[in-house]
Each structure stands twice: as C-alpha cells, then as structure tokens.
Amino acid sequence: MSANLGKPARLIWSLTGSALGTTLAADGDSGGWDQSNLNAVTPVDLRDVEDVWLTALCTGHSGTTPTLTVSLNVFDDGGNAWQALALAAINTDGVGGGKQASSGLHGGAASSYFVLPSWGQVAWAIGGSASPTFTGVDISLWAR
C-alpha cells in the first residue's frame, strides 16, 4: 500500500487566470503590496505554502534580441519586495525555450532551503530593442 503523505500541488497564480492578458510588451507584476492596510494581501497567497514551482514560456516574440525574465518576489512585514526566485531569460519560443525553477522548504541542498513569508508577487521584465513583445505567454506558479 502506498499513501500520499504530502500536500497535493495546486496552481496558486497564473497569467492566463489573472485577466492581465498573455501578450507582454512592458514590465509588470501580479499586484503590489498595499502599505495603507495593516492586513495587506496580494494576489499571490503563500500562507499555506511550503514549496513553489515557477514556470514561464511564450509562443512567439518580436523585436531585436528580446528577453523575458520572470521572478517570484516575496514581501516582508514592511511591504518591501525581495526576489526569492528568478528564472533565466526566455528568448526562444515554445516549451523548449521555457524556463522553470523551484524553491521552498524542500530544496536540492540545505543551503537552498527557503522559508516563504505570507505574501508574494510574480513579476516580469522585458528586455531588448525595437519594441520587444512576447505573445502566448504562460506564467504559472504552483505550490504545495
């Protein structure tokens, strides 16, 4: 008999589910910290999360030497954003050009373990020249 002793993975944020669209031509994020609210919340709720898996890919791009970088930022109690996880730059279309990274309490080595705070933010940056644009962008943040 085998038993599933761990938490099931679940999607906690995605670009397609955010109503932000899947064409990116400028830097952006999933939403910021409202410092006027002591009980501030963000669209990325990490309160019941031990581990995260961040993925990103696109189906098309334009411009000269375009790059798309995606990261997971976390917030401290003062609302300061800290980059917790960063993907290598995307400059190739499709799954083969997609990037992924994971972090949390269970890592590849003890030196990479990371305790997640309550709130986070998925952020992206566009680089290149001649008006770089990425289409069919899929950014997903999974957790358990």
Image (tube, helix red, strand yellow):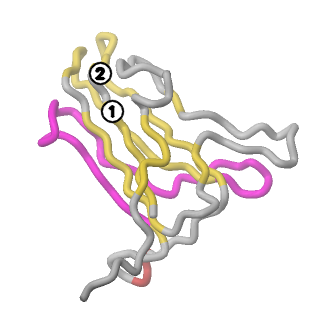
Side (left or right) of 133 relative to 94: right
Q: Position of residue 73 (x, y in %)?
A: 55, 49
Q: Nearer the viewer, residue 58 or 13?
A: 13
Question: Is 5 rendered above or below residue 25?
Answer: below
Q: Is residue 122 magenta?
A: no
- Residue at the spot 38% in from the left edge and 27% down from the top edge: 126
- Choose top left, top right, bottom left or bottom right for residue 15: top left
In the picture of the structure, the residue carrying the numbered disc 1 is 68
Identify the residue at horizontal 31%, vertical 17% (top origin): 132
Residue toward you, 134 or 47: 47
Q: Nearer the viewer, residue 3 or 93?
A: 3
Quarter of the figure that contains the C terminus: bottom left
Secondary element type, mark 2? strand
Neighbours of disc 2 within 10 Å: few (<14), some (14-19), many (20+) = many
Range of residues picked out in magenta: 75-103
The quadrant in which residue 85 appears is bottom left
Q: Do the residues bearing badges 1 and 2 touch, measured as CB atoms within 8 Å?
A: yes
Q: Quadrant of the N terminus?
A: bottom left
Amino acid identity at mark 1: Leu
Q: Is residue 99 above or below residue 53?
A: above
The image shows residue 18 at horizontal and vertical percentages of 50, 29
Residue at far left of view? 96
User: Which numbered circle lies on residue 134?
Assistant: 2
In the image as oriented, which residue stretches furthest toward the top?
130
- Determine whether 104 is above or below 44 in the image: below
**How far across and how far down the image is residue 34, in percent?**
77, 37
How many numbered circles are shown?
Answer: 2
Local SS, label 1: strand
Q: Nearer the viewer, residue 96 or 83?
A: 96
Instruction: Return the disc, 1 or 2, that comes first in the chain's sequence.
Output: 1
